[in-house]
Amino acid sequence: MTLLGVRSSVSLARELVRYALTNWGCGRSLIDDSVVVMSEIVTNAVEAAHGRTLRIRIALQEGAPILECWDQSSELPRACAAGLDALSGRGLAIIAAYAKDTGIRPSANGVGKIVWALMPIGDDAPVQ
């Protein structure tokens, strides 16, 4: 789904993840964790997009949710040491804490990048 790179798109992305994973029969814990991860991914993309469009994709890869977000910026998200009072800077650490695997890849058309997270499956796996 294509979204505008603005703050309000973060809540829309969360709801899209919740909708997709609920319809696939995922458990509450996996849905909640995936919502947190997509929220962080899209928040970073909104910062990089500067109002331009971004795209999200929610799919199943071997039964596990994979969450992706493309933005037009070639600037890579960077982990930083956030102070105790900092309002930002923890997104990549949060994503890594919840996801089984994460990464960044260039887009197929050479414009921008895709940040992705593969969620772990267990008792909350989608019904096959």
Image (cartoon, rainbow, N blue to C red):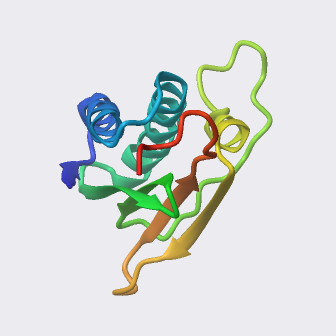
Is residue 17 shown above or below 52?
Answer: above
Q: Position of residue 31 (x, y in %)?
A: 45, 31
Q: Residue furthest top?
A: 85
Of 36 and 4, nearer the camera is 36
Left or right of residue 79, residue 4 in this image: left
Is residue 3 shown above or below 81?
Answer: below
Of 44 and 122, nearer the camera is 122
Q: Quadrant of residue 69?
A: bottom left
Q: Position of residue 71 (x, y in %)?
A: 37, 62
Q: Residue furthest bottom?
A: 109
Left or right of residue 21, residue 1 in this image: left
Of 109 and 78, nearer the camera is 109
Q: Quadrant of residue 20?
A: top left
Q: Position of residue 7 (x, y in %)?
A: 30, 32
Number of residue marks: 0
Q: Residue at x 58, y 62 (%)?
A: 76
Q: Residue at x 57, y 54 (%)?
A: 118
Left or right of residue 5, residue 41 in this image: right
Is residue 28 shown above or below 50?
Answer: above
Q: Quadrant of residue 97?
A: top right
Q: Quadrant of the N terminus?
A: bottom left
Q: Residue at x 36, y 37 (%)?
A: 25
Q: Position of residue 92 (x, y in %)?
A: 65, 43
Q: Residue at x 47, y 23 (%)?
A: 28
